[in-house]
Image (spheres, coloured by chain):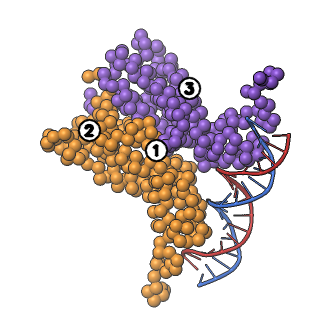
Chain colours: A purple, B orange, C red, D blue
Amino acid sequence: MSTLGTPARIPARYHHGDLRAALVQRATAVVATGGVEALSLRELARDLGVSHGAPSRHFPDRQSLLDAVALNGFQLLRAAVSGARPGPAAPSAGAVAGPRAAFADELAALAKAYVWFAVQNASLLTVMFAAKHRQEAPADLLAAAEQAFAVPLRVIEQGQAAGEVVALPVEAIATAVLATTHGFAALVAGGLLEPDDSGDVLARTVALLVDGLRPR
Amino acid sequence: MSTLGTPARIPARYHHGDLRAALVQRATAVVATGGVEALSLRELARDLGVSHGAPSRHFPDRQSLLDAVALNGFQLLRAAVSGARPGPAAPSAGAVAGPRAAFADELAALAKAYVWFAVQNASLLTVMFAAKHRQEAPADLLAAAEQAFAVPLRVIEQGQAAGEVVALPVEAIATAVLATTHGFAALVAGGLLEPDDSGDVLARTVALLVDGLRPR
DNA sequence: ACCTGAACACCGTTCAAGT
DNA sequence: ACCTGAACACCGTTCAAGT
């Protein structure tokens, strides 16, 4: 039935090795640098050395490319927060930590990683949220967003298991944690807060969330 | 010195009464509805019955019109949060409130007003933050943003005076409050959180911030 | 002082045609 | 299966000219 071993799966692309991946990668960089407004399909095609009509084979319109950029962004975000651990050089002097890292430290590390990513990729984050908010957002995009935001859930559950976090539904606590963290990042990205390179302001904000606003 | 009472301040506009104000008002509506991408200067001019070159007399380019939209947005936001008071129908039954509204209730009312505005005007808020974040953001825009975000400061100071809020610098507490509130709104606007029409989810989030995440 | 209308250099999208 | 290149209907911006 089949021809002599001619693979249908890898046809020779005679003009570009992998235009689709190249488009996503370059578009992500452009968006991260100059925002959505800076993204031009024609300019992208020019930079990659293809005709201006070529991208439409892989992305029917501009928005679908932006969706792919957003998907890529959520994967980058997930990687950024997944690797977050309380730094060994966190306290000012010596290893004064307890047997395991306390919940507050885990949370601070997570928040720091998120805010760092958000500040470094402010425009990308805007595209990510805008894409996810769209009515016709593709399923893989929604899934990637879920995965990225599921990371703090485990930290909270561990905190509850260790008796360091109040025994309310995880979702309720996650909402407060995410709101504070994302809000902090948005305020910095929006210029309402100084960049906070040291991370001290963020650390104090997380501490306020953990300990509450009431007098003590 | 002056001519016979001829007012130089109100010259007869022979094609449009107040094109500038009309542009800002209409552009704000367009942005609030369909986002930045939906704003076209030419379409705007068409709708207002002027030539496509007319807007450039009042706004040299598209961004300066967006700046004016953002300024308008911050004024609307300030009005929205300034009028926020703890609703008399807040508790489920009867007037069980203390002699004066407690800090937690004031804060919840403020957060509710902010989130309401943010959800109703999500795209506008994006434009507001993006405009404020720009390097060459005009001074009046920055001032309007300051005024809008100064509203919670007073509530916090009153809470401290009443001994209901920890005696840390107001800015530190304001950062936590703003981050949580703005973050909550951003999550809802971004589709990460359900719209929360009842306000219960927000109320519980504010309560978590006030009381802290630790067990009690 | 304010607006018109032509001109210019860009867009995104579509689609027959090529390989 | 993938890409080219012409065509179409839009943009934002500029600027001489009108009132």
Q: Is residue A9 visible?
A: yes
- Badge 2: residue crowd in 10 Å (few <14, some 14–19, many ≥20): many
Q: Nearer the viewer, residue C13 or A3?
A: A3
Tell me the quarter of the image containing the N terminus of chain A.
Answer: top right
Residue that mark 2 sits on: B104
Residue in the image at 37% along x and 32% along y: A176
Please state if A87 lies on the left or on the right of A171 as rendered: right
Q: Nearer the viewer, residue A45 or A26?
A: A45
For the residues tagged 2 and 1, is the chain the same? no
Farthest residue to the bottom: give it: B4
Farthest residue to the top: give it: A99
Foreground tag (3 vs 1): 3
Residue that mark 3 sits on: A79
Question: The residue under label 2 is which amino acid type?
Answer: Ala
Please state if A172 lies on the left or on the right of A118 as rendered: left
- Badge 1: residue crowd in 10 Å (few <14, some 14–19, many ≥20): many
Which type of secondary structure does the marked residue at label 1 adopt? loop
Which type of secondary structure does the marked residue at label 3 adopt? helix
Residue that mark 1 sits on: A192
Disc 3 to disc 2, how far (Cα)?
37 Å
